[in-house]
Amino acid sequence: MTRLHHMDSVKPYVWTVLGIALITAIGRLITPFFSPINVALLYLLPVLLGAVYWGHRVSLFGSFLGVLTFDFFFVPPVFSFTVSNIKDLFTFGVFLLVGIVTGSMATKIRNELEKAKEREKRLEALYSVGQQIAAKADLSEMLKTLSQTLSEAVGGQVALLMPATHSTALREVACYPCSMPFGDKEEAVMGWVLGHGRPAGRGTETLRRASPPIFPVKADNKTLGVLVVAIDSDGSAIPPDQQQAVEAFANLAGVAIVRVRLAEEAEQSRWLAESEKVHRALLLSVSHDLRTPLASITGGVTSLLLKEDVYDRKATRDLLDSIRQGASRLNRIVRNLLDMARFESGTLRLNREWCDVQDLVGVALRETEEILQGHKVGVAIPLDLPPVKADFGLLLHVMINLLENAGTHGEENGEISISASLGDGAIFVSVADQNPTIPRDEREHVFDKFYRLQHSGSENGTGLGLSICRAIMEAHGGMIWIDSLPGRGNRFTFALPMDEKPSEWEVEEGENHAA
Amino acid sequence: MPPEDTRILVVDDERQIRCMLKTTLAGNGYDIREAVSGHDALKETQLFHPDLIILDLGLPDLDGIEVIRRLREWTKVPVIVLTVREHESDKIEALDAGADDYVTKPFHMGELLARIRVALRYAAKSDDEPIFTLGKLKVDLARHQVAIGETEVDLTPTEYEILKFLALHAGRLVLHQDLLRAIRGPQRKDVHYLRVYIAQLRHKIEEDPNRPRYIVTEPGVGYRFGAMD
């Protein structure tokens, strides 16, 4: 390695010597025709080239060698270093001066060029990091790419550490390539950097011997974390020209962290505001809806307890009836609240099985017997309606909610008709009532949580039932909607997609299934 | 067995529920003892020798399911679960552990009384009656005949097996798996298969298959033959 390096550093001098030898040969050939001054100008060529390609040392070497060679081969007495004419000494002086000046200027230009290239590279890296910050939403992912970019730009190991939430202990959040174990000393320096917001370690003003260079990651005058940059294994200092780049990276990292944190906070507060709104509506609705049936229960019971013998048989019966109705209304509200809680908590898992719509309607009618008393309920389900894969328990809640809705939002003795049909890759089930038609502009809103019809006299339910129906249908990949019926009435329809057909259940024993 | 000689152990940690059950059941002539916890229930069962236990699942010390399991290690006393847990998996777990029936709170007293009567009758039954009647439906187990009023109903062998098993467990909750095992052998697990036969059976025996009265569905759990006592 060192020998190779050594050879590399010798090469420019060899080339210079060869160049001067060539010029000397050419010079000897043309001496009879040109004055020695012209030849002297030729010697400036290797000086210039050396300066451009290899720097001022080589060009200086070229200048001296050129002067000596010129003196030896061209200045009388030829083949001797002796100078007979004082004018020649002056020529040498000018030559050397020109060589040194051009050489150093060329070197300077060369250095400038290289620096510009370096800057461009770093700018490009910064630009790409900036783009990454804009594009990535995930903080840890972003910090990882950021440290990778920085590591490639400075050619060393990079680690980013941040204090864990609710503690001051630093935790590695990103590194590249990841093999940086830190000792107590390094950790102490990191703590200092975090506390003071200034760089420390090698090549900085503070704690130079304790650790590789460590930079603060700052934003809004707050130190969010520290950036450790180890150029090689013994953690030497960062060259001054790269230090700025590293600081720029640290700043970018700070901006990125703050940006993501702000986005997270905005999301959090939006969610909080939303859930607060829902909770307020819930409280309002629940306190009203739970207290109304409780009032009828308490009222009924206390009047019966107060004067047992005042009421005749019928009055007593009526009071008991209103107590029972209040209790079942409470039970319905609790059922819907529980359903909603299950949906909102995200713990709901569909238990899909083959469901027979007729069976579903049968159970729903049994469950709503009490509330549908006095209503005429018609059922029309085709005999050959295929089963549909769904969660029977949840479908039952949809059906019960629709029937309760039909039974409670209108006058008594209204007609309710349940129908089912197969069409277009889905099974459609409808519940139609003769209740006041829901205005067109309110039809979508009745499925919103806690929504109540603007001009509805009825105060039944929490306004939760239909929103739960919609949630259940959406969980099934189905739909639910309302049509108005000609004249008076509404028809609630839900559609369940028929994705698959039941397997080999039919005719297993060669039996005749014609019912 | 007349109600006066029938002892019922009520297990519930809520005083209000115990009080209400005690009043109603005693009013119906049953002899009532109360227990407030799982261990209490196990102890009282040994001391009191109840003919039936009404058991809450959410007890402070032992879970009700565990109480059923421990009871079943040594006694066949009918257990009716009375709980707020309404999920199908809870029902199946309780019944699998050995409970006889399952009633969810809030409940209708009429329903609970009917379930109590069914469970007691089933526990006391020595021989199967050859002829079973429910409303207009008549199932003659000896002659393999089913009739609605005077009209004989033509059933396929599987339909008949299902109806027979249900009739033998009249009023009781029959789990899908038990019914499948009874008609097909234990290897068959397809509940949908059962659903198809039940639908066919209803069309043959129910007056209105949209409002079944003889074969009632217990969602997600099974069927009950003749919900009305």
Image (cartoon, rainbow, N blue to C red):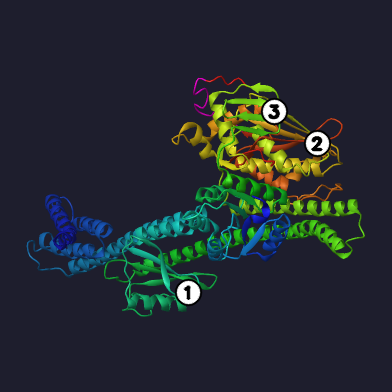
Q: How many numbered marks are there?
A: 3
Task: Tell me which amino acid carries mark 1.
Answer: Ser
Could you tell me the amino acid type at mark 3?
Answer: Ile
Q: Secondary structure at mark 3?
A: loop
| Rendered location of residue A385, percent (x, y) | 64, 26
Magenta residue span: A497-510
Going from N to C along the chain, the mark reached first, 2 or 3, is: 3
User: Residue flagged by tag 2: what amino acid is it?
Assistant: Asp
Which one is in front, A213 or A119?
Answer: A213
* Cα–Cα gap, marks 1 and 2: 62 Å
Report the residue marked by disc 2.
Answer: A433
Q: Can see residue A483?
A: yes
The residue lying at 87 percent from left, 31 percent from top is A487
The reply to whether dot 1 and dot 2 touch (C-beta < 8 Å) is: no
Magenta stretch: dominant SS?
loop
- Residue A332: percent from left, percent from top: 72, 50
Marks 3 and 1, the one that precedes in the sequence: 1
**Mark 3 surroundings within 10 Å by alpha-carbon count, few (fewer than 14), some (14 through 19), many (20 or more):** some
Chain hosting mark 1: A
A509 part of magenta stretch: yes
Mark nearest the camera among 1 and 2 is 2
The tag earlier along the polypeptide, 1 or 2, is 1
In the picture, measured across the screen, residue A364 lies left or right of residue A513, that is right
- As drawn, the label of residue A167 is 1
Q: Which residue is mark 3?
A: A381
